[in-house]
Image (tube, grey):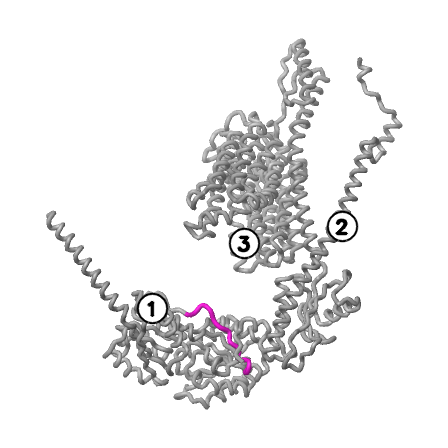
Amino acid sequence: MTHLINFLRILTVLVLAVTFSATSVLAQTNSTDPLKIAMILWRGETRVEDGFRGFFADRGIPVDLQIYDVERDLSRIPGIIATLRKNPPDLVYTWGTGITSNVVGKYNQVDPDKNITDLPVVFVMVSSPWKTGIAAPPGQSRPNITGATHIAPLPAQIQAIRAYRPMTKLGVVYNSGEDNSVSNVEELTALGAEMGFDVLAAPLGQNGDPSSSDIAPAVAELAKRGADILYIGPDNFIGTYRDALTDAGFDNGLAAFSATELEVRDGQAMLGLVSRYELVGRLAASKVEDILINGLSPADIPIETLDRFSYLIRLSSARRLALYPPLSLLDYAEIIK
Amino acid sequence: MTQNTKPKSPLPGAAKTSHRRIVPKGTIWILLLFSTLALCVALIGISWRAADLARADLQSEIREKAEIEARTLAEKIEHALELGIPLDAIVGFEDVVHQLQSGDPDLSFAAIVHGQDLLHVGGMARDAIKQALASDSDTGTGTGTDTHPNIITRVTLGHDAHNDHVENDLAIVIGHDRAALMRPVTDNLFDIAIIFIITLALSFELVLLVLTVNVALPARVARRVLTNVRERKFTILHGQSTRDEIGSFMEHINTVISRTAQKVGTRPHREREVKLIGVRLLAFMFVLAEELARPIMPAFFSQVTAPTIDGQLGAGIVMATHLLMVAIAMPLCSLFQERIGSLRMYLAGALLATIGLCGTAFATGLWDLILWRALSGIGYATTFVACQSYVLDATNDSNRTQGTAMMVSGIMLADICGPAVGGIFAGHFGDAITFVAGAAMACLAVALAFFLMDNTVRGKTSPPVPTRKAFKAMLGNRRLQVLVLFAAVPAKLILSGFLYYLTPLILLQSGATTAETGRVIMLYGLVALLTGWGVARWTDSKQNEIRAVGIGGGLTATGLLLAGFMPQYATFAVAVAMLGLAQATSIPAQLSASLKISADFTCDHGSGPVLAVLRLAERLGGALGPLLAAGLTLWVGTDAAVLCFGAIAAVAVIFFEIMIGHVPADQKTKPSVQEDAP
């Protein structure tokens, strides 16, 4: 009996030693290989991806980024998924609600044939992951998915608008075909009851695909109904035709507030409370590092947004509308001339 | 012989003249008068000069601050102009001025001026600013003279480029209230007044003790002995020993009385009075021992408990433990007070407090700190009950309220002096030494208790343990129930909820400084201290404690409702002062009333159980107060919470007045059996 126990002890030590050596060798091999990440993007690389790359460059972590640009066409996604299955990367990176929703499916409607379930997925630029079903409800988690959202909390957005000028009627033109836009408008309407404002909604695309030519009449209608300001939420369609919206606003004496950066920085929206895209990319990259290098499971990594936001003011738009920013905002807002 | 020693009788006319004199005759009085006048004149001169110098210093400080504020505003305007915002289209100047005012309450107004025109204004109406600037320029200085109500500061805007509206005479003008120059001086005056009052109170405490023990009591007993001799009775000797002239004189008298008594065949006994005044100093000392470290407790406890638990939480747990132990120990000690005796109980309590405070000073972590503070809490409760039982044993119905008020005055004085002295002490010697000083104070109290507490006071035999039936009957006493529910509980609930929770919260929120808030809270103790004795005498003379409790409740309700309807600094001060008067009227009277109401019970089973019930109810009220205040604050806001407390006080006093008078006649006061107690 004693001999048997001794034999088992020796065997256990040997097994542990072999396992440890094998793991060490494997880890050493892995540490020299670049992380293989497939990036599925909506409209090519943005500042988010600059931040993502910058994070790994700063830390000297080699990455092999395979770019798949859907060029605003979600029908390309099944083909990309098929390619990835043939040559699987270490991790998949998705940009925006539409792409992410197609790649991973809703938490309660996952189809292993259509969706990626066996690779870790990190998403960016998804404004409402819970409302759109990309993330599981609180208390549950999805085994292979985490990510970084980019939208400031809605109460903070409303306060940001009111720091600039009084607002009791918020005009929203949005694509009714986009889940994230619809849920955003619903949340705004509920918030309006608490914070004392009305949401004047102008949904587009209720009778088929929306058209850019629908935007100007919708804005004119909102102006007629007494909107104080136009709201640009996380909406791919409005994001694509942002200039049509802001120009219509100028024609009707309406300024535009944006929840996303590009509409102010590259467009003509007058103000915005936004996450800097580069920082969103860095936040997503830190989650990739946790998964691929630190060995954490995506299910254990929280879906987060940044804890600080930038207040952007586009002065050319303010000048055009003769709606200059209050002095107190000049202390902390980033002024874009 | 008799003729030689008899003093010369003054002439009748001369006596009349001396009665008419305002100032006594004699060189010493003239010198005293002269030196007092000279001192006053010198002090007034020095104060005047000091105030003048302080004003000059402050004026330069305010000018520097004003320059910085004006420059800050100017930079904002210049930044806006550089961004291309037209001067007349600048938005939010008034808001920026309001922001500056929140950091500097003395800032009256600010304006952007262009020549004589006011382009943007903030802080005051446009016309008022225009008038202020016009009267300033009339003086010719442009910077505000000593008589001008505002100190005006002007900063020229440096921006001159690319903007047609901007010319060289564009400037920021700001005005500060000239009264601000006197504010630090008046603040200091308040502090000096507080220190003056504390010093006076401490001196009074010592003088009162010395005079009572060495002069008043021996003289009173001597009068009784001599009156006895005059009546040709030789039955009492002077037993109030002192080693001064009165003592040696009365020793001679005692010898004569003893000799005469032997001749007439009587056996005189030594007469002495209980040193009730001593309990006042003992109460003062045990509270002072605890209160010395009061200002540093939260920070010190956080620091000690930080390695184990979140500092704030740790401090909260430790302080709650102390309060819990006091709450548990006080009623328990009340139950046993008559068995153990006041002196032994006080000694045990002071010893526990000494150990607890010493241990606290050298505590190393959460667990031992909890232990030390628990010991301190038990010590505090034990000494409190000991002092109270001493007072009850040494008084009767005719002076019980005064005796209690005397003890409460000692506690109030320590409440006022302790944190102030302790704060200064901690600043100089550190936190740990402050706790050690508290321990030393408690230790000194142990030594003094031997001299100041009369061991003869204790009742001859301890009363029998109350049966369950007797206890139930006591608890079923409707009048006692009314007293506890509508007077004792609300009094402590309002004290802790309003005075210690809502008042600092509201005053600090409304912009009062910590010192100003502290002064208002201190008013409570001061008023209670100054009025306690007089009110208690009145209560005893009228023998109507129930009325005193009702008046206390009414005063509390009036003050709180006033503060609730007009939540300003001045009305809060009035409300707090009224609360001080109300508690001084009500608390000692509650104690006397509870014993009178429960006379049936106390004559058989002693006062301990009744006091235990009263103390437990008070502690319950004290614990509920902050909880209720916090809940109401969250629910209806701070101002409305004060109104709610006022309403609670009003309802409680109305119910008290209605129900205390409508009880079965057999439960009304019966003649007290302690009427003839020593």
Q: Mark 2 points at which residue?
A: B48
Q: Name the residue under label 1.
A: A289
Whether A48 is among the magenta residues is no
The Cα–Cα distance between marks 1 and 2, rounded to whole angstroms, is 72 Å
Residues drawn in magenta: A305-317
Q: Do the residues labelled 3 and 2 touch (CB within 8 Å)?
A: no
The Cα–Cα distance between marks 3 and 1, rounded to whole angstroms, is 49 Å
Estimate the x, y position of residue B70 in percent, counting from the top left. Answer: 66, 68
- Determine which quarter of the picture holds residue B128: bottom right
Q: Find numbered disc 1 in the image and state the secondary structure of the residue it sits on.
A: helix
Q: Is residue B494 left or right of residue B200?
A: left
For residue B629, which numbered disc appears in the image? 3
Q: Which of marks 3 and 2 is nearer the N terminus?
A: 2
**Pointers 3 and 1 within a single chain:** no
The answer to whether residue A208 is visible is yes
Estimate the x, y position of residue A290 in percent, counting from the top left. Answer: 33, 67
The Cα–Cα distance between marks 3 and 2, rounded to whole angstroms, is 45 Å
Pick whichever, B413 or A69, lies toward us: A69
Q: Find numbered disc 2 in the image and state the secondary structure of the residue it sits on.
A: helix
Question: Please, which chain is the residue tagged with disc 1 on?
Answer: A
Q: Residue at x 53, y 31 (%)?
A: B446
Q: Is residue A181 left or right of residue B229?
A: left
- Determine which quarter of the picture holds residue B527: top right
Estimate the x, y position of residue A321 in percent, counting from the top left. Answer: 57, 83
Instruction: Give the class, few, some or many, for how many residues have Cα within 10 Å of label 3's Cα (few <14, many ≥20).
Output: many
Label 3 sits on what residue type? Ala
